[in-house]
Amino acid sequence: PRYPKGFFPEFAWLRSREAFVRNHPVADPKTGEIPDKATWLDLGPKVWNAWYEEHLANTEPLLKELNSAMEDLEDMIDSEESVSPGGLGYDDIILWDRLRGA
């Protein structure tokens, strides 16, 4: 739920952020269940935004968990130049893409 709040070029316009939220259902904060696409669309923007905001309000404990995981990740990275031995590769692209959205 943090993507549309980030400073990414693809979210430079309000409509792009709205489209992301519309097309990416998040879990119900109370049940943890992710609605299917049709149910999500039926819920509408008021519910979408409320759920996204409720998840954002839970950032602090998740950030502590993420920072701990980052310490574990550091030991798995081969060097400052690449994730795996042998130099820059596809695994670097995948890792940094995933971290971008963390």
Image (tube, rainbow, N blue to C red):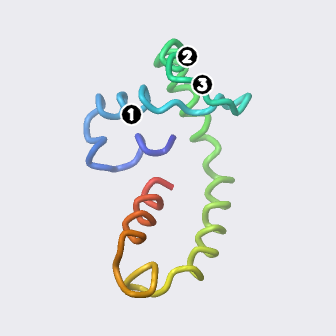
Say which amino acid is labelled 3: Pro
Residue toward you, 60 or 33: 33
Secondary structure under tag 1 reads helix
Residue matched to label 3: 35
The kind of secondary structure element at disc 3 is loop
Q: Which residue is mark 1?
A: 20
Q: At 57% from the left edge and 41% from the top edge, which residue is drawn?
A: 56
5 vs 77: above or below: above
Q: Are marks 2 and 3 in contact (CB under 8 Å)?
A: yes
Distance of label 1 from label 2 (alpha carbons)? 16 Å
Q: Secondary structure at mark 2?
A: helix
Query: Please, what is the three-letter code of the amino acid marked with disc 1?
Result: Phe
Residue, disc 2: 39
The vertical placement of 81 against 93, above or below, is below
The reply, left or right, for residue 87 in relation to residue 60 is: left
Q: Are marks 3 and 1 in contact (CB under 8 Å)?
A: no
Instruction: Pick whichever, 95 or 1, lies toward us.
Output: 95
Q: Where in the figure is residue 81, as x and y percent of width and height?
A: 37, 84
Q: Amino acid at mark 2?
A: Thr
- Looking at the image, residue 37 sits to the left or right of residue 12; the answer is right
- Residue 64 location, x and y as percent? 66, 61
